Image: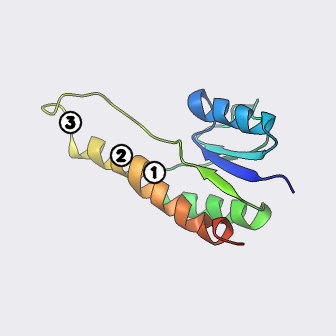
Amino acid sequence: MKPTTVITGASRGIGLATAQLLLERGHNVIGTGRKDPGNFPGAFYEVDFTNSDNLAEVSSTIATQHPISGLVNNAGVSKAVSIYDTSLKDMDAHYDINVRALVQITQAFLPRLTEG
């Protein structure tokens, strides 16, 4: 059976390139991101990583519909701003996407990832 790998932040850049590389190496690939790029080489699920309820719903759908064997946590944001100009709202957004969402999606797939 081919491995099935989920890639977060897969609509462009490193995430999309990772999906293409894994596909070439024999994986089924599943992408997640804010917007379907239209050219993703596998199943793609739109998700708002800042919304924990939406992420839980999409993660559950993926976990029940696909035999997941790998996860690439690529989604993230970075806003280069001086500490003088950084707001708590900006920091919350960074935390939500770069930390909380990563932990949440990993926990959702752990039962599948640790089988065997």
Quadrant of the image containing the N terminus: bottom right
Secondary structure beneath dot 2 equals: helix
Name which residue type carries label 2: Ala
Q: Is residue 53 visible?
A: no
Name which residue type carries label 3: Thr
Instruction: Specify whether 55 is left or right of 98.
Output: right
Which residue sits at x=55%, y=59%?
105
Q: Nearer the viewer, residue 101 or 50?
A: 101
Q: Which mark is residue 50?
A: 1
Q: Which mark is residue 93?
A: 2
Label 1 with label 2: CB-CB less than 8 Å: yes
Q: Nearer the viewer, residue 77 or 111?
A: 111
Q: Which mark is residue 86?
A: 3
Residue 49 screen position, x and y as percent? 50, 50
Please report whichever mark, 1 or 3, sits nearer to the chain's N-terminal start.
Answer: 1
Secondary structure beneath dot 3 equals: loop
Which residue sits at x=73%, y=32%?
20
In the depicted structure, whether residue 59 falls above or below residue 35: below
Please report whichever mark, 2 or 3, sits nearer to the chain's N-terminal start.
Answer: 3
C-alpha span from label 1 to label 3: 18 Å
Instruction: Specify whether 78 is left or right of 58.
Output: left
Name which residue type carries label 1: Thr
Quadrant of the image containing the C terminus: bottom right
In the depicted structure, whether residue 103 falls above or below residue 95: below
In the depicted structure, whether residue 39 falls above or below residue 114: above
Secondary structure beneath dot 1 equals: loop
